[in-house]
Amino acid sequence: MDWERAAQGFAAMGSESRLQVLRLLIRAGHDGLTVQEIGARSGIPASTLAHHLKFLTGAGLLTQTREGRAMRTRADFTALEQLAGFILSECCADTDRKAANNG
């Protein structure tokens, strides 16, 4: 994952409402939720919810598919795992390097 894509992903999660939506979808698992279900569970008004979903989808954190008249939204677990891997990829690298130099 490159720096620009990582920054977009983390920026997309940069509001309480978007984090709330993302966590709802993570809890829902691979089945996801319809937009109406997300609105009912989050209490976010439809127009505001549409904005947040567009932001998260644009950053590649969500996918959406049409099911008749409903739109099903799912967390993109691969993208989320890549973001987690990006931020954690150098965990403790300086500590490990320091230990190797002292050993």
Image (spheres, rainbow, N blue to C red):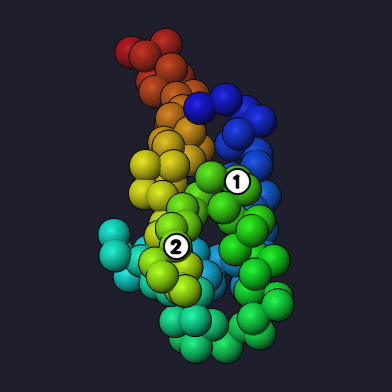
Which residue in the structure is indicated by mark 2?
66
Q: Choose the circle earlier in sequence order: 2 or 1.
A: 1
Please indicate whether residue 42 sits to the left or right of residue 28 in the image: right
Can residue 42 be spotted in the picture?
no
Q: Residue at x 36, y 49 (%)?
A: 77
Dot 1: element: loop
Measuring from the top left, give residue 28's x and y in whole percent. 33, 70
Q: What residue sits 57% from the left and 53% below the top?
A: 57
Residue in the picture at 70% in, 77% down: 47
Q: Quadrant of the C terminus?
A: top left
Quarter of the image where one finds residue 14: bottom right
Q: Nearer the viewer, residue 67 or 61?
A: 67
CA separation, marks 2 and 1? 19 Å
Horizontal arrangement in the rendering, residue 75 relative to residue 17 (left or right): left
Amino acid under disc 1: Ala
Percent position of residue 18, x then y: 60, 66
- The single residue placed furthest to the left in the displayed view is 30
Q: Residue at x 47, y 68 (%)?
A: 71
- Count neighbours of disc 2 (C-alpha within 10 A) and say few if under 14, some if 14 to 19, many if 20 or more: few
Query: Does 35 appear above or below 51?
Result: below
Q: Position of residue 99 (x, y in %)?
A: 38, 20
The residue at which mark 1 appears reads as: 59
Instruction: Pick the residue in front: 65 or 4.
Output: 65
Residue in front for this viewpoint, 11 or 95: 11
97 over 46 or under it: above or below: above
Is label 2 or label 1 in front?
Answer: 2
Which amino acid, mark 2?
Arg
State the SS at label 2: strand
Q: Residue 59 placed where, x, y %?
A: 60, 46
Mark seen at residue 77: none
Q: Tell me the quarter of the picture where residue 100 sits.
A: top left
